[in-house]
Image (spheres, rainbow, N blue to C red):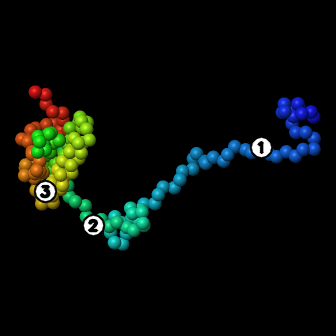
């Protein structure tokens, strides 16, 4: 065979060795699924211990979870605007007067970092106040007492169809 024939793909020259062409790369079986992660086993020292919760392999023990008001409400709800010391509206504290109470932020995005951070701080303050009130076995109807949220100011309660309803237009 001439050099021209070899380059045209006519096959190997006489007396040369050939190697097998590599086949397609082995691909995983599309039907085979990886086994799911095992469920955490109940630990001897509590139901919520699991070594994956800490990078060093130690376990976390959760003895109790704070009690909170329900988040599923019955309409209508009462909600009151929460403002900071400067009068900036941060969101609403709401309750259905039965079992549910919570915090709702305005639907509009914060105008900047400072407003967003103020909303987060107010929300954390409200959730802590609601957790403490529920811990004292106060009914959800008591969630709109202004002294619970000091130093924030709580406005007068107003009726709404839902906690995150838009502000009524004047």
Residue under numbered circle 2: 63
| Label 2 SS | loop
Which quarter of the figure is the C terminus placed in? top left
Earlier residue among tags 3 and 2: 2
Earlier residue among tags 2 and 1: 1
Q: Residue at x 20, y 58 (%)?
A: 67
Give the quarter of the image for residue 40: bottom left
Q: Residue at x 13, y 56 (%)?
A: 133
Q: Residue at x 37, y 67 (%)?
A: 59
Residue under numbered circle 3: 133
Whole-Å distance between the Cαs marked 1 and 3? Answer: 75 Å
* Position of residue 15 measured from the top left corner of the image (x, y, whole percent): 93, 44
Q: Residues within 10 Å of mark 1 (few under 14, many from 20)?
A: few
**Can the viewer see residue 13 in this picture?**
yes
Residue under numbered circle 1: 21
| Label 1 SS | loop
* Position of residue 90 measured from the top left corner of the image (x, y, whole percent): 17, 41
Q: Looking at the picture, does residue 13 appear above or below residue 99?
A: above
Whole-Å distance between the Cαs marked 2 and 1? Answer: 63 Å
- Which is more foreground, mark 2 or mark 1? 1
Residue 124 or residue 160, whichever sits in front: 124
Q: Looking at the picture, does residue 163 appear above or below residue 126?
A: above
Earlier residue among tags 1 and 3: 1
Which quarter of the figure is the N terminus placed in? top right
| Label 3 SS | helix
* Callouts 3 and 2 close, C-beta under 8 Å: no
* Position of residue 43 measured from the top left corner of the image (x, y, whole percent): 37, 69
Give the quarter of the image for residue 158: top left
Whole-Å distance between the Cαs marked 3 and 2? Answer: 20 Å
């Amino acid at each position: 065979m001439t050099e021209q024939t070899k380059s045209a793909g006519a096959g190997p020259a006489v007396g040369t060795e050939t190697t097998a062409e590599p086949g397609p790369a082995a691909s995983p079986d599309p039907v085979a699924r990886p086994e799911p992660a095992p469920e955490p086993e109940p630990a001897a020292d509590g139901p919520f211990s699991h070594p994956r919760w800490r990078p060093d392999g130690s376990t976390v023990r959760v003895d109790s979870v704070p009690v909170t008001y329900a988040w599923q409400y019955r309409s209508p709800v009462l909600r009151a605007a929460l403002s900071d010391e400067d009068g900036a509206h941060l969101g609403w504290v709401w309750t259905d007067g039965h079992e549910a109470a919570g915090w709702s932020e305005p639907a509009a995005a914060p105008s900047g970092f400072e407003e967003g951070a103020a909303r987060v701080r107010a929300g954390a303050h409200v959730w802590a106040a609601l957790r403490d009130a529920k811990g004292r076995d106060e009914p959800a109807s008591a969630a709109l007492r202004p002294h619970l949220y000091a130093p924030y100011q709580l406005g007068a309660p107003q009726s709404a169809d839902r906690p995150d309803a838009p502000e009524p237009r004047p």
